[in-house]
Amino acid sequence: MSKPLRFDVSGLCLHAGGTSAGRVLFDGLSFSVAQHERWVVLGPNGAGKSSLLAAMAGVFARTRGELMLQDRPLSDWSPRSLADWRAWCPQFWADPFPASVAETARIAMHRGAWWTVQSDDDGDVQRVLDELDLATLAHADVRQLSGGERQRVALTTALLQGAPLLLLDEPASHLDLAHQQLLLGVLARHAANRGAVVASLHDINLAWDLASHAVLLDGRGSAIAGTRDAVMTPPQLSRVFGVAVDRVEVCGQTRFWVGPLRKAASSS
C-alpha cells in the first residue's frame, strides 16, 4: 500500500432502498477523498448519509455514477482486497453470541487462515483498547456494555482491520463528552498517520472540529461537497436543517449557535 490513498465519487445518484423505485436521496454528487483528509457527512435524518457510506463501502447499490478506489472501479475489487483498503463501521450492530471485548476486537484482524493468532496480535489489540479507553473492559461480554462502550468497540474493530480508509456511520452516537473528544483525536491521528476518514455526524460543532472537508446532503435530492469552510457556512446549514445557524468565535475557537426552528425557505 505504498501508493497514497484515493477514493473518487463521480456523478453519484442514490435512491432510498437501493432501487430506482425509492425516492432520490441525492443526484450528481462528486468528490474525491485523498490521503490525510478528514471528511464529514452532514444532513437531516433520511437524507442518505448512511447510504452514501454504505455505497462507498461497496454494500449499497447506486443508480448512477462511478465509485473508484485507487483508480479502479469499486466493483472490480474482491471482498478480501477491498477489506485491505477500507473499513466500514455501520450505525447498528448485533451481538448474538457471547464474546469478550478483546475477542471481538481480535476477529477484525483478518488473516489468511481463520482464527490464526499471530504473535503481535495481542499487542495490537491492547494498544487500540488503550487508545479508546477500553482496556479495563477487555474481558467484559460485549452484550453487557453500554451504548457508548459498544460504540468504541466498533471503532476498535475498524481500526484493527488495518485499512487506510475508515468509513464510519455516526461514530459519536452514544458517546459522552469526554469520549467524543477522544474520538476526534483518534480519527485525526488515523488520518495523519494511516490514511483518511469519512464519518457521518449530527453535531455540527464536532463535525467542524474533525473535518478538513464536508459533504452536505439536504434531504431533498441535492448535495454539495468541498472544503469544510466552503460547505459548512451558516446560510447553507440553515437552509438544509431548517433552523437558524450562526457561526461565532469563542475563546479562539469556531462554534455554531443553533436557534429556533424555522422554514427553510426563510433562511437564505
Image (tube, rainbow, N blue to C red):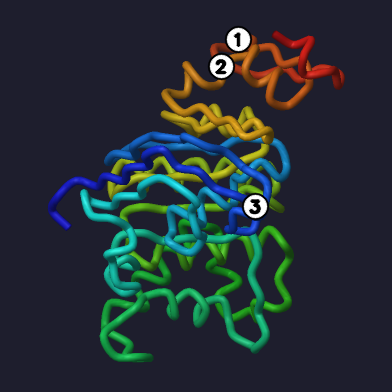
Q: Is residue 135 above or below residue 101?
A: above
CA distance for labels 3 and 2: 37 Å
Residue in view at x 50 percent, y 59 percent: 61
Helix, strand or loop at label 1? It is strand
Q: Amino acid at mark 3?
A: Ala
Image quadrant in which you'd find residue 188? top left
Kindly check if marks 2 and 1 are in contact, taking CB atoms under 8 A apart as contact.
yes
Residue in view at x 73 percent, y 27 percent: 241
At which x and y percent is residue 131? 46, 56
Q: Which mark is residue 106?
A: none
Q: Is residue 150 above or below residue 219?
A: below
Image quadrant in which you'd find residue 258? top right
Q: Earlier in the sequence, mark 1 or mark 3?
A: 3
At which x and y percent is residue 162? 33, 64
CA distance for labels 2 and 1: 5 Å
In the picture of the structure, the residue carrying the numbered disc 3 is 16
Q: Amino acid at mark 2?
A: Gln
Q: Is residue 201 left or right of residue 246?
A: left
Pair 3/2: label in front: 3
Residue in view at x 51 percent, y 41 percent: 184
Q: Amino acid at mark 1?
A: Glu
Q: As rendered, which of 28 and 9 lies closer to the eye?
A: 28
Q: Earlier in the sequence, mark 3 or mark 2?
A: 3
Q: Which mark is residue 253?
A: 2
At which x and y percent is residue 31? 38, 34
Q: Is residue 253 left or right of residue 144?
A: left
Helix, strand or loop at label 3? It is helix
Kindly check if marks 3 and 2 are in contact, taking CB atoms under 8 A apart as contact.
no
CA distance for labels 1 and 3: 38 Å
In the picture of the structure, the residue carrying the numbered disc 1 is 249
The quadrant the N terminus occupies is bottom left
